[in-house]
Amino acid sequence: MENMQYAEELVREFLIFRGFTNTLQTYETELRTDIGKGFQVDKIMDLIFSVYIPKFQAEKLYGLLSFFEQYLSSSLSEAVLIGTLSKLEASILRYYIVHALQVGRSDRVVDFFAMRGRELLERSHDWTPWFAIPYIKNPHLDPEFHIYFSKEWFEAMHLSVRNFFCEIFNGSRLPALLKISSDANSTNSLKRDIRQLNLKLSQLQVLLEEKEEQLVQLRSVEGSNDSSSILHEEGIYTLKDTPDVCTTINPHLSQTEFSQDSVDGPSKNHSEFISSYYGDDSTLQLGDLLENGKTGDASQKVHDSPHIENGEDVYVEEDFPEVKVEHQETFLGHTSPISRCRFSASGNNIASASLDGTVRIWTYDSSTPASRNATIYCGTEILSLDWENKSDRLLLIGTSDGCIKAWNVDAKRVVCDLNTTKTFPSVLDVKCSPVEPIFVSAAASGGGVSNNLDNLGFASLTVWNMKTWKAMTVLPLGEDPPAITSLCFNHNGKILAASAIDGMIHMFDMSCGLQITGWPAHDSSISSILFGPDETSIFSLGSDGKIFEWSLQNQGQILWSRNCSRLRYPGDLKYCRHEMALDFSGRRLLVTSGSVRAPIYQVQGRRSGWRTLAHAASVTTVDWHPTLPIFLTGSADNSVRVTSL
């Protein structure tokens, strides 16, 4: 029954969409007088034996039986069932006559034969004796009709009719339209299973990485202990027999100089000597050098190691291992560099924006219907995108001329066109609440987006209602506040984080619309901000290329950091600002890049990270799938890629 109702709604929706109003009226009228009753056996039996026969509605009874005959006639394989239905139809009509005589309404029998007598005779001559039955004084005693007045005959006939309807309705082929709902449910069930399996796979991968990190630590400690033992047992002259190691440490230092310095300075042992070149991590480096000196592979160890800058590890993108890709798909629908791309709430759809002033909605999954695919022509620079969090139905688009468009992917049209004040024309970011039907827009008084964030002017934060499409309130930022570049809600939508071009992070309580805290996070402007997976921390990406993970429990404390300043955009890229994205596990951080590859950092891990497969130009925008190890990269080469790990 649920499938039937779903199919009826699909038909109604299609008729409205095509404008077939006359057909729609007829359709709804027939639904109200549906003689098939949704093919529910009990309702059909009640209709025949509790309504049509007791109330002497012979025309409706005859119409119902004709309907089922036509229903079976539509299938060539139902010839046997048609014959059975003809016999049962005759029995039902004879019971109609018997019931009328039993209650003393012989006039109804006369009317019935006047209406259908000729047709019945054409079908079978067995009906001939029945034309006399209204005029027989005691038909229940007549040998010709005695059996039809017995209780046993009625019960047998009633059971036969029920069994027949059960047979044809349970065994007949359902129309394809009725299978849409069940097929969709099966598909959704399979997708849920796939998500759960992928989630389990990701958890196992994280566990494997942790174990591998522990193994690396144990090997490093073991190598360090072995090197100390070698120095202690064999003396400092041992390194004279390993010229490759000396050359690897410093190619400008001869073996003689190394040995002489070691002899002349007894307080300066080998560990201290290495430390003068490699900092505090020299013990690990020395162990690696001694261990790999036998195979001549020490140079590779030094190449893979981090550079030390101001006491921080600075991993070079070119040294990252390449990600292992299960599948990759490239979308080439845009004609200009990509400025933004975002997965929808379910991850089934993707929205990508380009400098050509268009937004394209598309799907990368062949099992997902492409009916929502569309191209939205905005006619101006697109600065921000965000999907409604509870469905894939609405997409918000912020532009450089103060416009915020709400695109309905089902109707394939703009359902609302909002405008900020003329004072703040650049909509740098829009963010939907994960719980309530509201969104926040960050607008700036300066012109379009640029690599130089200092020219964005002042900020305005507005909260909008997505039911009335009207502004609710403006969040307080003080007098002439610096432009807000990035927004982020926590999981329940009660806290909003905002980053500014003066390096500040602001935190707002959305229940009262007031700022609750804030702190200076960078010496330069902040281009992107994200809550951590457990929301006890927040990530910030500065225009200087530095990434910090800040503790929200101990404000101002840095939990993790990376410096990707080498990956900043070249000066000629005037159309994009750096951004970052966390995967669903919160352990992988994907960052845009001025290089053709983007780095994926391992958060809170000893591993340096990975690098994506190469585009033909800089990586300008990134995003992660909400539940799967799949990420998006948009590039200045006009392409968008979906990569599955």
Image (cartoon, rainbow, N blue to C red):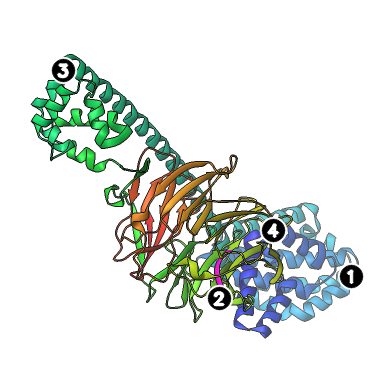
The region drawn magenta spans 425-430
Residue 419 % position (x, y)? 63, 77
Kindly report which numbered mark, 1 or 4, lies closer to the viewer in this rendering.
Answer: 4
Quadrant for residue 293, please give it: top left
- Residue under pointer 1: 105
Name the quadrant of the N terminus: bottom right
Distance, label 2 to label 1, CA atoms, is: 62 Å
Residue 414 % position (x, y)? 59, 77
Distance, label 4 to label 3, CA atoms, is: 97 Å
Is there a contact, CB below 8 Å, between mark 1 and mark 4? Answer: no
- Residue under pointer 3: 235
Q: Nearer the viewer, residue 239 or 29?
A: 239
Amino acid at dot 4: Val
Residue at 44 percent of width and 45 percent of height: 561
Kindly report which numbered mark, 4 or 3, lies closer to the viewer in this rendering.
Answer: 3
- Residue under pointer 2: 412
**SS for dot 4:** helix
- Residue under pointer 4: 41
Kindly report which numbered mark, 2 or 1, lies closer to the viewer in this rendering.
Answer: 2
Query: Viewed as shown, does residue 450 lie left or right of 308?
Result: right
**SS for dot 2:** loop
Q: In this view, does 561 lie above or below 20?
A: above
